[in-house]
Image: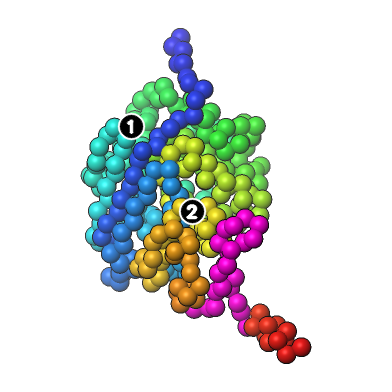
Amino acid sequence: MCVVEESTEPSRRGGHELTARGVTVAYDGTDVVHDAALTLSPGQVTALVGPNGSGKSTLLRTLARLQHARTATLTLDTEGGGRTDGLALTTRDFARHVALLTQGRPTPSGLTVRDIVEFGRYPYRGRWGKADPDGPAAVRRALAMTDVEELAERGAEHLSGGQLQRVWLAGCLAQDTGVLLLDEPTTYLDLRYQVELLDLVRDLADDHGIAVGVVLHDLDQAAAVADRVALLYEGRIVADGPPEDVLTAARLTDVYGIRIDVDTDPLTGRLRTRATGRHHTRTERLRATS
């Protein structure tokens, strides 16, 4: 019997940087992402925000090579591995560097939590079921990082939405990559699970040096979790930088087509946004005249 010794230290695949340049994506002959440029740096969270249809998810899927681009350059810089053309790698080799958590995954039936997380090891197993000596440790690590260890043998069909989202994320972490892409990971989650998942995303960057790119609709969540924000509008990145520089009232009002005020939360010191609709405006007028 071969005994594989494993370290109790968490895996650190930090040092990976993914750079995209000149990304143009077309649907039915019409460009929907225009000459986009984005860099995901190790130990940083980059949030992609913008109105519906602005190209956020399309750009993220292009970074994961799941969406064909009319033009694009993808460069991977890996610690100790040098610079690599991301488009020249095989699908399996690319998946050892970049993982994607897509939105709207179905609930699998007849599979345990451990089964799902083990699927994340597919880039390391080879076509003919090649041995994966690091797999068991990676799976245990991913279960622990997402706090679903106690659910390992439970059937996926018996999980809540928040639990299942953590399990899918654990599968991505078992992939043991240096770049993690998340497409609207908080959708359909209640407030508690939203906060806990974003805390985990922050931990992945801070404690494990992972480069994280995440699509979010909630501007306050983006401001709270991200080091950088890329604001998209009609397929173009119109601003890219620290949240306080990108998420300004004038810019957001222009992009979203509705009045958006921006201030600082006195309790957390973080940026806070508020969209003002017709009824808010009416209330303000009544207060002003009373």
User: What residue appears at the point 47 percent right and 60 percent down from the top-left corner?
Assistant: 243
From mark 1 to mark 2, how far is it between C-alphas? 37 Å
Closer to the camera in the image, 168 or 244: 244
Q: Is residue 175 above or below residue 135?
A: below
Neighbor class of circle 1 (other Cα within 10 Å; few <14, some 14-19, many 20+) is few
Give the SS element for disc 2.
Answer: loop
Instruction: Using the image, determine if residue 18 lies above or below residue 117.
Output: below
Is 185 on the left-hand or right-hand side of 245? right
- The circle drawn on residue 45 is none
First to last magenta residue range: 256-278
Q: Where does residue 89 sit, x and y in percent of width and height?
A: 26, 41
Q: Which residue is mark 1?
A: 127
Residue 280: give x, y in percent of width and height: 66, 79
Q: Position of residue 272 (x, y in %)?
A: 58, 64
Q: Amino acid at mark 1?
A: Arg
Q: Earlier in the sequence, mark 1 or mark 2?
A: 1
Residue 201: horizontal and vertical position, in percent? 52, 46
Write down the residue under mark 2. Answer: 226
Task: Judge depth for marks 1 and 2 and give the one in front.
Answer: 2
State yes or no: residue 271 in magenta.
Answer: yes
Q: Residue at x 57, y 38 (%)?
A: 146
- Residue drawn at x 45%, y 73% is 251
Q: Residue at x 32, y 41 (%)?
A: 94
Image position of 79 (left or right of 49): left
Q: Is residue 273 positioned above or below 12 on the image?
A: below
Q: Is residue 96 magenta?
A: no
Q: In the image as oriented, which residue stretches furthest toward the right? A: 290
User: Along the line of sight, which residue is nearer the eye, 80 or 245?
Assistant: 245
